[in-house]
Amino acid sequence: MNNKSKSKSEAGYFAIARESADFSFEDFVSRYYNTEQPVIIEGVGESWPAKQRWTETYIRQALAKETKAEAASLWYWMERDMLSGDYQTPELVQRLLDASNTFARSKSMRIWVHNQDNVSSWHFDGNMVSVFNTQVTGQKEWFLVSPDTPLHCYPFVNFAIMNGNDAKSLIHKRYTHFMLNEGDMLYIPPLWFHKVISKAPENISLNWIMTKKETTVCSKTLNRELEKYRLQEYLFKHRFAWVKRTSKMIDAKLPGFLRSNWRYQSMIITQQPQRRFGLARYVLEELSALGRTLWHARKARSYYQQLKPVKQLDKADMNQPD
């Protein structure tokens, strides 16, 4: 069932690989996880009770009873096995979460609830996470771009500059485009840019996220991320207190989805070579994007204004009987 795709270094469209729900863990790791290539595993959530149960109201009421669940800016955070009667964690996800070469994190699950025509604009996720995204209800249209052929980003963040012309942006990029249907799980490798459009009246997705302790895959985007985290560490530990205070104050004022501070005690181990004068070159390259940023500022403003944060969880009745 696996579709042959273009070489990792070859630009242009490629058809995303598709595998069945009984795809083996060993084959997944060797073909996709280690090589950091996307794949759809079909039918993972086909028999989940969540397909019939989950609505935004149900999720908010159920998570309100969980003391450690919380609403972030655009999604809900869960710890592992919360609402476990509604779904089954896929074996490959369970094994990777428990692997010794994966950083431990307290909250590794997210729920996204989107109405029809909601657009998540081009970005990649911070902390170099691998994302296992199951479409519980509804349908979403996905675009993915390889970190080998990155999009132009706003300075110092992981959101691509909105120019209103995807066709032009995808020229000379290695990308794929597909629909993710109910019950199917998408593996999004670290640092892959994605844009997502919700198609059904209500669309609910369940994510598991994790970060490897080591990767052998190098890319232009990985280089940018490593230099960003080195710059953040330099500023947050600066010998001058005012530099530390100012840097942390600016970071605290950013919306949660724009923050991507490294959350682990050690940095991921990579084979990515460091550039000479890397931090200085990184800062200059990021500042060089200001002209393009200002030119398209109106598009970013309108997108930001239409974002709808998730509703907060009402914990007041969490101890009340059902």
Image (cartoon, rainbow, N blue to C red):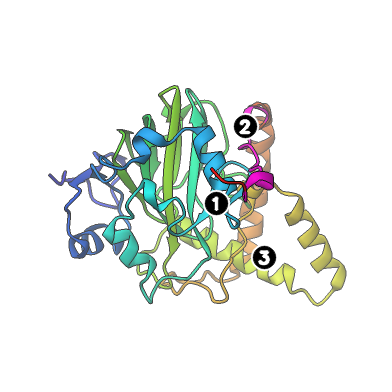
**Marks 3 and 1: which is nearer the front?**
1
Of 270 and 50, the residue lying toward us: 50
- Give the side of residue 217 with respect to residue 226, left or right: left
Picture quarter containing residue 230?
A: bottom right
Image position, residue 26 (x, y; %) = 19, 65
- Camera-side residue of 20 and 123: 20
Is 41 on the left-hand or right-hand side of 54? left
- The quadrant in which the N terminus is found is top left
Residue type at the position of mark 2: Leu
Range covered by the magenta-colored residues: 305-319
Q: Is residue 192 visible?
A: no
Q: Earlier in the sequence, mark 2 or mark 1?
A: 1
Query: Which mark is in front, 2 or 1?
Result: 1
Return the residue found at the far left.
1
Q: Position of residue 116 (x, y in %)?
A: 47, 23
Alpha-carbon span between mark 2 and mark 3 = 27 Å
Percent position of residue 175, x then y: 34, 40
The answer to whether the residues at label 2 and label 3 have Cβ atoms under 8 Å apart is no
Type of amino acid under label 1:
Trp
Q: Amino acid at mark 3?
A: Gln
Q: Residue at x 17, y 59 (%)?
A: 24
